[in-house]
């Protein structure tokens, strides 16, 4: 649980963030140095469009005015004051002098023209009363409507008053002019602008306009090469996370959920079908490490090569790392585990990095070819075949996918180059990964076995020089065992490698083994019990030598188990023909320490070793005799229980 949770968390962080910033530093007015495409489908908010809509909304909000108290009554009072002053001036005898007329004008509450004042002074009292009543009526009616303290409102109202006064038939033209002048100057604004309320309402209206999301489709050209950058472009780059990359927490949460499901499904698969791996914590750590390194390699590789994560070339890099991880899992853990791991890893990286579906499929198919090649390493030429297989498979995938997508020839040739490069790169990374991970995790792969099969290995060269008969015997046993393993589906390369080293313990006393004797048999001078001790010691000596030169555990198993607990019949019969009588205790003294073979490979090695050793003493090695010998040895081992513990 801890390992799975940690893996999900680590993969989420790796897939959600850029280890080396993949940013585009462009501002409004700059010129784009390259074509930029959207690497995923997102929605963006246009700043310019939003500002335009908000400006229109603000313009639709009218000014807010507050009523001016007593404005109408003050205007009517001014009218009354005008007429009272005129009536007071008329009460004096004679015409007013210029000085008196000027004094009267200054006492008026509003500025009237000389013509209006002269007309009012010359009007009879009845006429003044009518003018006064008409003026009060007009001012009251006009002031009942809104008159804002705008520079344009008073002139508009005065024009309205002039038009209305001209239609009054009860007055002379001079009186109508005077009436219009009085009313026009008496009226005043009855509403005052409230800038605070106006601004508050406009701000509310502006904020009520929500930004309208617009889609950016995957693959859409955001900026063409040499195109000037506008505010719209910057908005799109920000939405894609290319201008100011930041962690998208909601996306991380959903990605973490998806990765958790994938890891859980894979763990269920291991628990159900590969319980020995599920219960082996170091191998689970190895699987988690390989998955993490593949994603880390993908992210770092793209950043180092300068590849943008919105470009299609990341899909080819994804093929390289997923194929490498799948091959390493096939070699270090098992091909049956590598196949579902490759599928789930391809899906996880595809979703996490928004990689095109065709590249996800290409990565999985390439991984299948790599798993097959990694599982069939038999000799050094297999590594060359692995690289060729990957290159051909990748090229075929690119050809098919390019044809389906209708790519141009230029894109196809570029993809073909990437395909070949990824094939060769995966083979090299596989070789390096095996070399680095075999020993720390105690795993023996076919790559390591191929190195041990090199006959120039120091211990094999020493065997050739000091125990040539044993060396020849080991080579023949290797041929026999390899053929048998291939026939029943066992690991033929492992069997061959075990056969090369199964008798290295004989190096310490080579003259005591018949295949190395040329003149005499030293056992003729020893009693059977002592001979048995010397013969049986070569197993313990072989294990000690193997540990000294740090041979892997499977080879030690071959050395330890290739005789099982078998009976050394030759010396046992010698002992029973002498002074000792047959007994269970005596028989036990002439048996190897074991253990019995625990696997198909060590069982095959036991049978091949027995067959080769016995066949060399046949007087006439005809096919029929050899067939009888093989059958007899097989049945002897079966009846002796030596194959009871192997699979």
Image (cartoon, grey):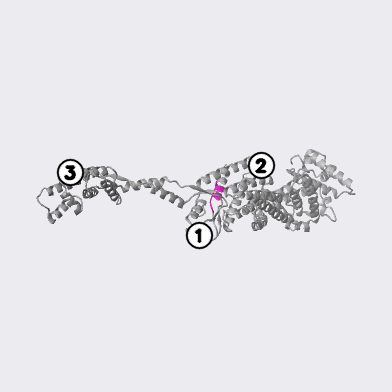
Image location (x, y in percent) of residue 531: 80, 48
Residue 398 forms part of the magenta stretch: no
Q: Is residue 521 left or right of residue 309?
A: right
**Nearest the eye: 445 or 499:** 445
Please name the residue that numbered disc 1 is placed on.
228
Tag in front: 3 or 1: 3
Image location (x, y in percent) of residue 297: 60, 54
Local SS, label 2:
helix
Tag in front: 1 or 2: 1
State the residue at coordinates (79%, 53%).
475
Q: Quadrant of the N terminus?
A: top right
Image location (x, y in percent) of residue 335: 69, 46
Q: Is residue 504 left or right of residue 625?
A: left
Please name the residue that numbered disc 2 is placed on.
276
Residue 11 forms part of the magenta stretch: yes
Q: Is residue 203 visible?
A: yes
Local SS, label 3:
helix
Local SS, label 1:
loop
First of labels 1, 2 by sequence position = 1
Image location (x, y in percent) of residue 558: 74, 48
**Nearest the eye: 104 or 390:** 104
Q: Is residue 222 left or right of residue 57?
A: right
The dominant secondary structure in magenta is helix
Disc 1/disc 2 C-alpha distance (Å): 61 Å
Q: Is residue 442 visible?
A: no
**Nearest the eye: 407 or 250:** 407
Tag in front: 3 or 2: 3
Q: Is residue 177 left or right of residue 87?
A: right
Instruction: Say which mark, if any, is on residue 129.
Output: 3
First of labels 3, 2 by sequence position = 3
Q: Residues within 10 Å of mark 3 (few under 14, many from 20)?
A: some
Which residues make up the magenta segment? Answer: 9-18
């Amino acid at each position: 649980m801890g390992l799975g949770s940690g893996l999900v968390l680590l993969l989420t962080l790796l897939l959600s963030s850029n280890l080396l910033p993949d940013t585009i530093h462009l501002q409004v007015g700059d010129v784009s140095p390259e074509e930029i495409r959207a690497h995923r489908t997102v929605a963006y908010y246009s700043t310019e469009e939003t500002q335009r809509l908000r400006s229109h909304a603000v313009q639709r909000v009218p000014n807010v005015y507050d009523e001016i108290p007593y404005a109408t009554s003050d205007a009517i009072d001014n009218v009354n004051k005008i007429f009272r002053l005129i009536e007071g001036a008329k009460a004096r005898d004679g015409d007013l002098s210029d000085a008196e007329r000027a004094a009267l004008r200054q006492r008026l509450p509003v500025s009237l023209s000389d013509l209006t004042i002269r007309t009012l002074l010359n009007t009879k009292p009845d006429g003044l009363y009518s003018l006064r009543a008409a003026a009060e009526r007009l001012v009251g009616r006009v002031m009942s409507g809104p008159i804002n303290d705008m520079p344009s409102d008073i002139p508009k109202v005065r024009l309205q008053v002039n038009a209305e006064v001209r239609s009054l038939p009860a007055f002379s033209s001079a009186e109508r002019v005077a009436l219009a002048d009085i009313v026009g100057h008496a009226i005043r604004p009855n509403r005052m602008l409230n800038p605070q309320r106006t601004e508050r309402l406009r701000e509310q209206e502006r904020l009520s306009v929500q930004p309208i999301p617009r889609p950016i489709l995957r693959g859409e050209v955001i900026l063409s090469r040499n195109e000037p950058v506008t505010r719209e472009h910057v908005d799109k780059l920000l939405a894609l996370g290319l201008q100011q990359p930041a962690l998208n927490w909601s996306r991380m949460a959903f990605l973490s959920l998806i990765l958790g499901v994938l890891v859980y499904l894979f763990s269920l698969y291991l628990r159900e079908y590969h319980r020995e791996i599920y219960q082996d914590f170091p191998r689970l750590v190895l699987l988690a490490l390989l998955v993490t390194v593949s994603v880390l390699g993908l992210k770092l590789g793209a950043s180092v090569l300068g590849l943008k994560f919105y470009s299609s070339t990341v899909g080819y890099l994804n093929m390289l790392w997923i194929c490498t991880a799948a091959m390493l899992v096939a070699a270090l853990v098992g091909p049956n585990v590598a196949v579902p791991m490759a599928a789930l890893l391809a899906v996880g990286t595809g979703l996490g990095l928004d990689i095109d579906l065709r590249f996800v499929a290409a990565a999985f198919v390439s991984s299948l070819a790599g798993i097959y090649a990694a599982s069939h390493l038999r000799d050094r030429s297999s590594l060359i075949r692995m690289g060729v297989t990957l290159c051909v498979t990748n090229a075929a995938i690119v050809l098919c996918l390019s044809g389906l997508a209708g790519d141009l020839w230029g894109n196809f040739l570029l993809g073909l180059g990437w395909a070949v490069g990824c094939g060769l790169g995966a083979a090299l990374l596989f070789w390096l990964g095996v070399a680095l991970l075999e020993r720390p995790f105690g795993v023996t792969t076919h790559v390591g076995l191929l190195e041990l099969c090199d006959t120039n290995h120091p211990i094999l060269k020493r065997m050739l020089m000091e125990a040539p008969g044993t060396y020849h015997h080991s080579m023949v046993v290797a041929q026999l065992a390899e053929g048998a393993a291939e026939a029943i589906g066992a690991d033929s390369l492992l069997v061959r490698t075990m056969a090369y080293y199964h008798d290295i313990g004989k190096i310490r006393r080579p003259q005591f083994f018949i295949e190395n004797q040329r003149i005499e048999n030293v056992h003729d001078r020893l009693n059977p019990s002592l001979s048995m001790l010397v013969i049986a010691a070569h197993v313990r000596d072989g294990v000690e030598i193997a540990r000294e030169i740090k041979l892997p555990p499977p080879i030690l198993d071959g050395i330890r188990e290739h005789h099982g607990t078998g009976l050394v019949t030759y010396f046992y019969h010698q002992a029973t023909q002498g002074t000792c009588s047959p007994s269970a205790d005596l028989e036990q003294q002439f048996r190897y320490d074991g253990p019995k073979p625990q696997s198909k490979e060590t069982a095959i090695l036991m049978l091949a070793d027995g067959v080769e050793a016995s066949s060399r003493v046949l007087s006439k090695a005809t096919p029929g005799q050899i067939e009888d010998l093989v059958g007899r040895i097989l049945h002897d081992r079966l009846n002796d229980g030596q194959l009871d513990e192997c699979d």
